[in-house]
Amino acid sequence: MAAGTTTRRRTAALLGAAAVLLPLLTVTTPASAAPAAPGRAAPEKAAPIVLGHRGASGYRPEHTLESYELAVRMGADYIEPDLVPTKDGALVARHENEIGGTTDVADRPEFADRRTTKRIDGRNVTGWFTEDFTLAELKTLRAIERLPDIRQHNTIYDGLYQVPTLQEVIDLAKRLGRQHRRTVGIFPETKHPTYFRSIGLPLENTVIATLKRNGLDHRDGRAIVQSFEPTSLRMLDKGLKVPVLQAISTAGAPYDTVANGQGPTYADMVTPAGLKEIGTYADWIGPEKSRVIPLKADGTLGTPTPLVRDAHAAGLKVSPYTFRNENQFLPADLRNGTAPGDYGKALKEYDIFYRTGIDGLFSDNPDTAIIARTAFLKSRS
Ligand code: G3P
Ligand code: CA
């Protein structure tokens, strides 16, 4: 039986990471989940956790130690490394294995001949790929801002920071935890796991071994693993005790489903039956935020779907992605002006989502996520 499964089933009542971290949050007043029944105290709902998405990627080039450290200093409960492998099998933090848009590799003549086109998850992708570089070679590169048009201010850091390994992210989380006298969790995600398995660089065993070696294989919430692909999550669940999150996109199907010709689409996953199935290997879902509150045809925010309620009924916690301050990523009615990179009414968006009963959220701007959480918790106390 899967290492995590026995405890997972026992933990429909598991308060999970949020409960572990609750005393350590800036605001410790728990949100009330439901009105008190006569003669009974109101049940307490743990405060939603804030996940520093790719670190504090609204303020630093994503997936760098500097981005993660800033997220922690801003109060993020977790930092979130996406994981891809190098040629020699090291796990490094990048959202994509193609690194032309997030490093200075295109300006390195010594690597010009590594530029190539590959088929990744059914798409042709041209550029430079982590699996064609040794870790030592990758360490000579420097990170650049992925969204320079939207986050021009972050380009000031271009060329300064390295691509970190998973081990370095863990070491950072431990060091910052000691420094700030609180738990700093990590939330690693396997990227393109079917593809990497197909080229002989599977991710899962290395994730399992690394978490075990670092004493993180527990259900105490210091580490939670995630992926879009259920096959990868089932492997991680089998090898680890840590909680598991199933990421759920806006449309389509995870690539393992596409490759195998069977398995759930993302639409299947958000049905009650799909959520029940996810509950056999996972503890959380991480839906794209429009699956919690869709946009209307005019781009303004609509009304919540039953997803949070249905997920909770299936014993799953819910942490939607991705919250960002800029107009480009906000509903039309929460923008300030029309410039895509200007900040909109992000605090309002957080507040609306916290009120749906979510258990956490992924944010590029952990400071604003926490400011909004503080106000939300105060309003509920
Ligand atoms: O699991 C939620 C989140 O990590 C997915 O976002 O940025 O990795 O595509 P992203
Ligand atoms: Ca991610």
Image (tube, rainbow, N blue to C red):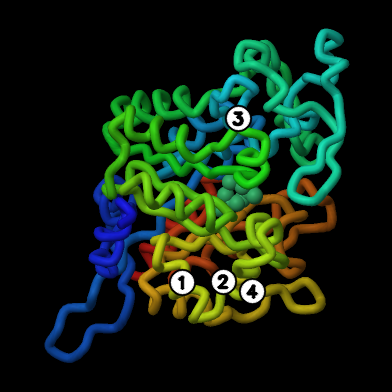
Q: Which of label 1 and label 4 is nearer to you?
A: 1
What is the secondary structure assignment of the residue under circle 1? helix
Q: Which of 369 and 173 is in front in this view?
A: 173
Asked if residue 119 lies left or right of residue 233, the reply is right
Q: Determine which residue is flagged by label 3.
A: 85
Q: What residue type is labelled 3?
A: Pro
What is the secondary structure assignment of the residue under circle 2? helix
Q: Residues within 10 Å of mark 2 (few under 14, many from 20)?
A: many
- Outermost residue to the left: 39
Q: What residue type is labelled 4?
A: Ala
Q: Residue 203 carries which label?
A: none
The answer as to whether callout 2 falls within 8 Å of ligand 1 is: no
CB under 8 Å between callouts 3 and 2? no
What is the secondary structure assignment of the residue under circle 4? helix
Residue 63, image quadrant:
top right
> Is residue 312 placed above or below 284 in the rendered structure?
below
Which of the two discs, 3 and 4, labels the residue nearer the N terminus? 3
Residue 258, how many percent across, how many down? 70, 60
Residue beneath the point at 54% across and 28% down: 91
Q: What residue type is labelled 1?
A: Glu
Separation (CA) of disc 3 from disc 1: 29 Å
CB under 8 Å between callouts 2 and 4? yes
Residue beneath the point at 46% across and 65% down: 318
Q: Which mark is residue 269?
A: 2
Which of the two discs, 1 and 2, labels the residue nearer the N terminus? 2
Residue 215, how many percent across, how many down? 28, 32
Separation (CA) of disc 3 from disc 4: 29 Å
Q: Which of 39 and 245 is in front in this view?
A: 245
Which of the two discs, 3 and 2, labels the residue nearer the N terminus? 3
Separation (CA) of disc 3 from disc 2: 28 Å
Q: Determine which residue is flagged by label 4.
A: 267
